Image: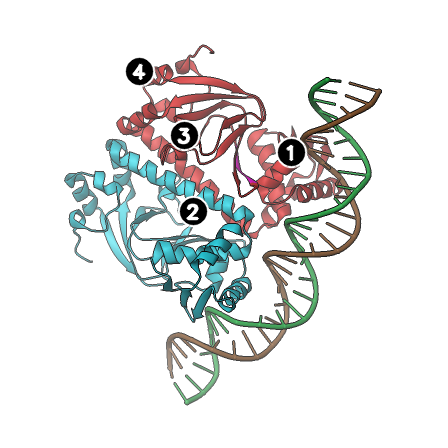
Chain colours: A red, B cyan, C green, D brown
Amino acid sequence: MQKKDCINCLNKSKSAQNLSAEEICELERNCSMAFFKPREIIIKENSLSSSLAYIKTGLVKIHSFVLGKEKTLRIINSQTYICLPSSFSDNRNHFSATAIENTEVCFLDVNIFKKFVKENGAFAFDIIHDLSQNQLKNLHLQVESNYKKSTGRIAQILLFFAKEIYKSLEFSLPISRQDIGDLTNTTREGVSRTLTDFNNNKIIKIDRKKITILNEKFLEEINIKG
Amino acid sequence: MQKKDCINCLNKSKSAQNLSAEEICELERNCSMAFFKPREIIIKENSLSSSLAYIKTGLVKIHSFVLGKEKTLRIINSQTYICLPSSFSDNRNHFSATAIENTEVCFLDVNIFKKFVKENGAFAFDIIHDLSQNQLKNLHLQVESNYKKSTGRIAQILLFFAKEIYKSLEFSLPISRQDIGDLTNTTREGVSRTLTDFNNNKIIKIDRKKITILNEKFLEEINIKG
DNA sequence: CTGATCATGTGATTTTTCTCACATATGTTT
DNA sequence: AAACATATGTGAGAAAAATCACATGATCAG
């Protein structure tokens, strides 16, 4: 196991900044860290959530397999707790989490975490803030996907990777067309067609996994208008 | 204004049970209650959320109007806080709330509420629990709507009203076909067709607004399988 | 009672998306 | 390099859903 140094960790969560040195040490004594390569499963849906997972570095997808269909709910960036709602409801992981890039995960003791919520108001407040933001983001996505056609939803994913994950108009897609389909409620074929269409119209340039956004403004328009 | 008696209120939230008599009195001094008739707007999206709304009795829909399209996100039953995430993020109401039945709403002071979160760990814990459950419910709905066709989503709404709201196989629909469309990502026409189809197949009986579920098992099957 | 307004039902047509089928990569293992 | 699995592109047809058009029904103010 890797040597831990939580106090000086540069990838601490924002809410952990409300913890005292003492509390962080307590957390450190009750946590473990693990590395995951792309495609490795971090959390399996329906397993017991004995510990809380925090993405220190890397990229993860949250997904669920129901009635023979895979659905990807979200791509989660580093410095985020995953399955927080699962830990605070019935201690069962409701969704799976799989690494899509090299990922470092801290597994924290749920009970210590819960203790901090009860004893440290500022910490609890931050967790609530975090959950609230998440909820709002989800609901806004739901509203948007109401008026968007598949083209718009795919444009959105491309912009999401460019702006929120890689902060660059050129990036290497960490997921397959099938994954994009699972994420946007479409099929592998539909994604393929839309992407080549974008490519033909010089909105993006595709070279294998490498995507370059050539006309961000237009892609933005497709994202918003449908 | 109606006389308040929060301590003896039978419609208190579960989390409020963690508040001391003193705290409840403090809340009482800083809250107001209002009645809303069907179609009256309780909260308007993009307004400032100066207070937190709690549905004491009644039924409410949460909705949003974006780019000329109305989307209903959820039907909210009584004894629920609405716009809790909005209050804990940027103090802006992200969504509208409109009564769909006679509804009593308590407007609580956000700052007092936030103070309790910071000072009363059990209360904070319950709020987190509540937010978590909500989030999970939302995500499950998203997974489900992935493999469901419009027929399945409409069946789901009917079962929702029967089981979660009215606890009866016979009930009066509190919302229009258009509303059901906004809720299920379909059109007014589509809902109409599906409902008459259900009616013709003796799965439900329609008499104006009155719905009777005749074949719950089959409706359940449509709900699950799509 | 009587327009007027809003909600609903229904057919016909168009648009969008899914499904199936198969070709062509690309990557991995032996 | 050959053999295999896996990922991707593309066409054609089927299915689902949206849109348009219009008729009918319900509700409500005056």
Q: Give the residue type at disc 2.
A: His
Q: Give the residue type at disc 3.
A: Leu
Dot 3 corresponds to which residue?
A48
Q: Are marks 3 and 2 in contact (CB under 8 Å)?
A: no
Q: Are marks 1 and 4 in contact (CB under 8 Å)?
A: no
Same chain assignment for discs 1 and 3: yes
Q: Which numbered circle lies on residue A22? A: 4
Disc 1 element:
loop
Q: Nearer the viewer, mark 3 or mark 4?
A: 3
Disc 2 versus disc 1: distance between alpha carbons? 33 Å
Q: If you read the primary sequence from the N terminus, does the residue marked by circle 1 or circle 4 appear first?
A: 4
Outermost residue to the top: A3
Same chain assignment for discs 3 and 4: yes
| Magenta segment boundaries in residue numbering | A70-75
Q: Nearer the viewer, mark 1 or mark 3?
A: 3
Dot 1 corresponds to which residue?
A176
Say whether residue B67 is visible: yes
Q: Is residue B170 above or below residue B33?
A: below
Same chain assignment for discs 1 and 4: yes
Disc 4 versus disc 2: distance between alpha carbons? 38 Å
Q: Give the residue type at disc 4.
A: Glu
Quick one: A167 or B133, which is closer to the camera? B133
Q: If you read the primary sequence from the N terminus, does the residue marked by circle 3 or circle 4 appear first?
A: 4
Name the chain under label 4.
A
